[in-house]
Image: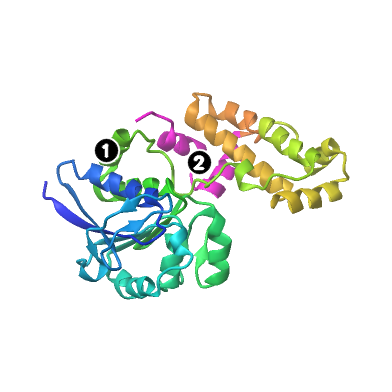
Amino acid sequence: MKQRSVHVLVVLFEGVQSLDVSGPMEVFAGASRFPGVSYRLRTASLDGAQVRCSSGLTLVPDTALADAPAPDLLLVPGGPGTRTPAPELVDWLRVHAPRARELVSVCTGALLLAEAGQLDGHRVTTHWSVCGMLARRFPEVRVDPDPIFVRDGRLATSAGVTAGIDLALALVEEEHGRDVALAVARQLVVFLRRPGNQAQFSAQLTAQTAVREPLRELQHWITEHPDADLSVEALAARARLSPRHFARAFQAETGLTPGRYVERVRLEQARRLLEDTTEGITGISRASGYGTPEAMRRAFVKALGAAPAEYRRRFRSQPV
């Protein structure tokens, strides 16, 4: 097999998140151990000087950005340092990012690319905590807060920290096939099963926790009883509120309507059962509150772009 070497350049700066750097680099380095696969990894900071990560770890770059060869894949990690970036770093990205064959950001690295004008008109994601800020500051960027990573042409963006590993594995799979990506995942003792459109968080973590105890307890009860009657009327009765008052209070305190929260809980339950059990589709649809396989199929296609059977085939839990 003819080996084509991919030059990867990782940008370093003060306050970078170390896992955003090391996670993808370990994936590419692991893939390079296989015949026909070669990722040449280099790191660079503005002046070639060492940088201090958000954790206190010190990283020593290979070179200065000005001296770095043009990469095939330019990777911009995140971290607190993306909030107040050096203007020279943004200027460098504005000039050099368009020249890379593939442009990748991990976590809040998307903020740096947005500052450099590289995300306009693109669908992107980033760490859930800054999705709103990114959308407000850069209205030309289409921010999707839900997926763990998004591929839009030559641009790939990921959510927080470990999602960078998922994205790197997906890039390896695109380039070299599932077997290589699966072998790398095995070496890193992770699962090769998270699709890009998997939600960043579970339903309970996505929603805010209600302040009032009756609503907070109801959130937990919904999670534990996805197959119950979870209509607004039934939930309002359990919370001892009128349906109208309950719906307004629930959304005000959790950030989601009751119906949206229930949808996420049921989808999460069904996904978990498909991934971790051998239960049939009909049984899972009932246990998850969908009632029928067809209702569950519609929910999966809408949210994940795949029917339950296809989802199970692709993402069934198998320790690798």
- Quick one: which residue is furthest to the left in this view? 2
Residue 179: assigned label: 1
Residue 160 at x, y percent in the picture: 47, 51
The correct choice, above or below, for 206 with respect to 156 in the image is above
The correct choice, above or below, for 215 with respect to 54 in the image is above
Q: What's the magenta bit mostly, secondary-structure-wise?
A: helix
Residue 249 at x, y percent in the picture: 80, 50
Amino acid type of the residue that numbered disc 1 sits on in the rendered structure:
Asp
Instruction: Tell me: 7 left or right of 317.
Output: left
- Mark 2 Cα shell of 10 Å, populated few (<14), some (14-19), many (≥20): some
| Callout in the foreground (2, 1) | 1
From which residue to which does the magenta span run? Answer: 293-320
Q: Which residue is mark 2?
A: 307
Q: Residue at x 28, y 66 (%)?
A: 100
Instruction: Tell me: 256 left or right of 188.
Output: right
- Looking at the rendered image, the quarter that the C terminus falls into is top left
Q: Residue at x 71, y 46 (%)?
A: 259
- Mark 1 Cα shell of 10 Å, populated few (<14), some (14-19), many (≥20): few
SS under mark 2: loop
Instruction: Tell me: 190 left or right of 274.
Output: left
Amino acid type of the residue that numbered disc 2 sits on in the rendered structure:
Ala
- Quick one: which residue is furthest to the top in this view? 278
Residue 318 at x, y percent in the picture: 39, 29
SS under mark 1: helix
Residue 90 at x, y percent in the picture: 38, 72
Instruction: Tell me: 78 left or right of 74.
Output: right
Q: Quadrant of residue 288?
A: top right
Q: Residue at x 19, y 66 (%)?
A: 69
| Alpha carbon separation for disc pair 2 and 1 | 24 Å
Query: Is 300 included in the stretch rendered in magenta?
Result: yes
Q: Residue at x 24, y 46 (%)?
A: 29
